Amino acid sequence: MTVLAEVARIGDCLRFWADRRPAGEALVCGGTRLTFGQLSELTSKLARALAATGVARGERVAAVCPPGLEAVTVFLAATDIGAVFVGLNPAATTEEWRRCLAIAQPAVIFAASDHDGQRVAERAGLLADDLGYPCRLVALDRTLSGTAFDSFARTTGEVSTEALNARRAEVEPEDPALIVYTSGSAGAPKGAVLTHRSALAGMTAQARHLRLDSTSRSLMHIPISHFGSVGNVLLSTLIAGGTVCTLERFTPRSTLDLIERERVSVWGQVPTMFLMQLAVPDFDSFDLSSVSTIFFSGSAIPAETVRRLSRLDAMLFTGYGGTEMSGPVSLSGPDASVEELCETVGVPLPEFEVAIFAGEGRPADQGTVGEVCVRGACVFAGYHRDPEATAAVLDDDGWYHSGDLGLIDPGGRLRLVGRLGDGFRSGGVTVYPREIELVLEQHPAVAAACVVEVTDPLFQHVAHGFVVAAPGREPSSEQLREHCRERLINYKVPKSVWVLDELPMLAVGKIDRVALRRLAQTAGDQHPSRPSAAPGPVTARWSNEKGDSIDDI
């Protein structure tokens, strides 16, 4: 029988398993291995130090470090005493940190001394001095061999066990637990506030439906600025009593190496990461036999990618959710077909309410496209210090309005067709980009596709497509347009289809449609077949100069 730590506060998860399985392996970070008992002891030491330094309930504690021992410990210690965790990506720019910190105003910033050649703590220190309010910086010096927290504790002193337990007892399920920043290609970031209740509700549901248990070994390799890191991986695995295996800097090969070496069983990430890993020339030489669960979400996945992953002896899941929903609110079943995994995002979970609203907040009929709305314990509390943005997405009845367009099909599955504003009128008829993308991805020479609308003097808007070719294939624009003509009515056929080496990505790992729309609008009637013919550079933020890292998401 699977046992989950169904508790009211995040800190209770670790104590739940430290009491029941103190010698069970909880965390693997490079050469460091910690049991639940050891992780609990380390977390308590830092929690005491944070309390001693004056961090109050509801104050923010930021971490600027890669996914690893420090990030995990700061997250667990801060939430344990009722502080609010704020994760920042060490690879982000100083200005990006500044915008987020200006909203959060943390009392303490923990910063890695360096990461991937960048002097993170030095940059964070200069920024902390310039924020305009008291903020303590703690540099996590790796030369101390894991004793950085001991050094911090010596400078602050430690509160007693009794005082620590009193702080823990003050924490309420509705208290804020973490702030996760969300933003698109433009505009200021918004800090989504997740409570203990919402984060635990979302991640308990995920752990249950993905069938996680104490034997699960999960891969944590996504930057801690995303809920996918501390939530979908760390928290869900902790709830199940499994083991978290961290990787501080993602590359396709290093991920595969870690899966093989640590016998990782739960492999979850965004589709783009799978595309990069499957492109490793000797992918088939890695021993991935330990993988029993593969989970992808965040964007559409090409059918060929699913077919290749299906060759592994593992259950494949897709789902729909997001930061404001504290994880997935719909999931596919373990026996879902390739079509279901590519064209739907599974069935709404019974723990939450998922509805399609079409006009004036009224539920739509089955099969009718409308806005996907969610209600339940998983829904976030609002945007930190931004009541207007909060009111725009949370209504008086508790529904979160996602801005995503979708429908419920006859099988009860949720199908996404785009975002509010993504659907466009062409010659007086509404066109949804995802329908065209699915057709393009059916072509055997296409690995991934994105369709955007461009203004047109005759039809108001027309579709333009961008694809990444499958390995060893070089489809032409006309071949792909002919493929579409055979499967779509005329007004849905893209005016052009460009073949690019890679698609531009937003910081959250989703395709940057604004950049592609700008490119298509600038190009006019040109139909380049390779990116060198495009009117400007098109590069994916997923790639560094070596073309193998997403460390900047």
Image (cartoon, grey):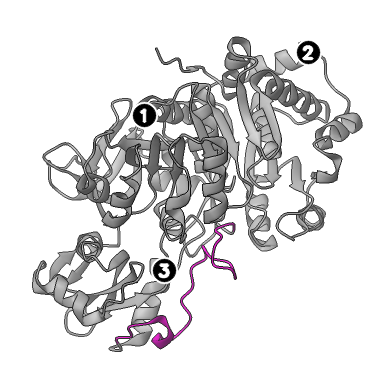
SS at mark 3 in the image: loop
| Residue lying furthest right | 155
Helix, strand or loop at mark 1: loop
Check disc 1 and give the amino acid type.
Gly
Image location (x, y in percent) of residue 271: 39, 53
Q: In the image, what residue type sits under mark 2?
A: Thr
For marks 1 and 2, give the one nearer the viewer: 2
Q: Residue furthest front?
A: 285
Q: Residue at x 69, y 21 (%)?
A: 40
Residue 212: x, y in percent?
43, 26
Q: Give the labeled residue for mark 1.
A: 376
Q: Is residue 470 above or below residue 16?
A: below
Does the segment drawn in magenta span residue 38?
Answer: no
Which SS type dominates the magenta stretch?
Answer: loop
Q: Which residue occupies 45% across, 35% down? A: 290
| Badge 1 vs badge 2, beta-carbon distance below 8 Å | no
Q: Which residue is mark 3?
A: 503
| N-term-proximal mark, 1 vs 3 | 1
